Amino acid sequence: MYISAFADTINITKHLFFTLEGSIDKYPITINIHIENPDNITENKKSYIDGYYKYNNFNTPIPINGEMDKNTIKFTAFDYDNSNKKEEFSFKINNSQLNNIINLGNGKKSIDLKGSWKNNNKKLSCNIDTIKPLGDKIHTVYDISVSKEYKDNTYGLSALYIENLKSSIYEGEIINKINNTNEMIKKINDDIAKVNLNEEEIFHEVNFYNFYNKFFNDNILCFTSSTEYYYGGAYPDTAISHLTLDINKLETKILTLSDFVNDSDKFRKTLQSEIDKHYKEIGEDDFTIDVINKSDSFYAETLMSRNVSINRYSDGISLHIRFELPHVVRALDDFEISFEKLKPYLKKNIY
């Protein structure tokens, strides 16, 4: 009798997403917040928070970072190019307000947070009136990773389970009618069981999701799907897709540069200038990526179809573009250009 002994690994990380609406003094603001491991808060620990705030009259998202415990929410908007510009937000919270944040569920609720906004020596009141799920639909998200090992072989799959919607993002698609995390774990296990880990050839293939440094608002939620794999040979590798959840349509998209900008000679020259400057800053003056000459450069020819994502970038947001390189150079280069520099070429009504 032959018995296969498999080692199972299950990791679950809880995330909260929500939108706060209020004002700094008399100026209306909207704050989109992400909390990783929110259960730390109810266990008298601190949780890291990140997100974006904007003045409603300007509609320009400003990145924030901070922390939250049972009694306070504190975060900062910091301009890395201007150390004198440091906006600090601080709020006291009670048990009822904490419960509204942790157990928000569906729909908008009053929260009545009283706090302050400070920028150097200037201090104003900052009051939050309401709280709601991100895009009125997304609050609690579980990042679920399951993998199995047999000898030197490993295979793993992941899902993002959206509790409010009883839906999951799984293998890049939305699947519905998943009632809880246990049902999602069972589905992943069933799919992993279809893979023959008894094969003699060594292989490693594990998929996982990540929200790190990604943009979100009431319309979209950006994240990455990464698959680490190794089937023997000289190099392991990682395949990364930048995905965007359209919250209104509840569908995942692989956005490309053409979704954001209109192609033109002026745009390409601007992008080329930023790429050249980037390589000069990192001491690689003799290396660049040609995005202008379509007949001579693969990068120029395929530029507009490149997968992109929206990331935080110093005091604003940027478009993240990945260029794959020959292994003799290195696997890839990540490049970012701020939306401020892209403004003359941006399409109307983007996210």
Image: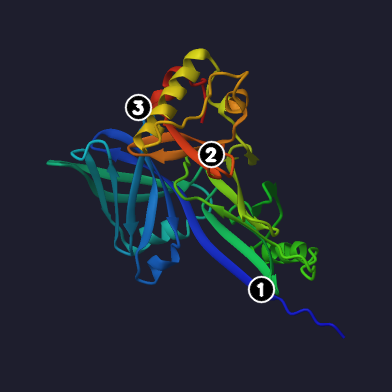
183 versus 208 height, above or below? below
Q: Residue furthest left?
A: 121
- Front residue of 263 and 132: 263
Could you classify mark 1 by the number of other residues whose Cα lies within 10 Å: few (under 14), some (14-19), or many (20 or more)? few
Q: Find residue 145 and report its horizontal and vertical position in percent.
A: 61, 62
Of labels 1 and 2, earlier in sequence is 1
State the image quarter where residue 242 is shown.
top right
Q: Residue furthest right?
A: 1
> For the residue marked with disc 3, what is the amino acid?
Asn
Q: Find residue 60 and report its horizontal and vertical position in percent.
A: 37, 31
State the image quarter where residue 331 is shown.
top right
In the rendered image, which residue does mark 1 sit on? 8
133 versus 57 height, above or below? below
Query: Closer to us: mark 1 or mark 2?
Result: 1
In the rendered image, which residue does mark 2 sit on? 220
In the rendered image, which residue does mark 3 sit on? 57
> For the residue marked with disc 1, what is the amino acid?
Asp
Write the residue at 70% across / 51% down.
176
Q: Find residue 134 and report its horizontal and vertical position in percent.
A: 49, 45
Query: Closer to us: mark 2 or mark 3?
Result: 2
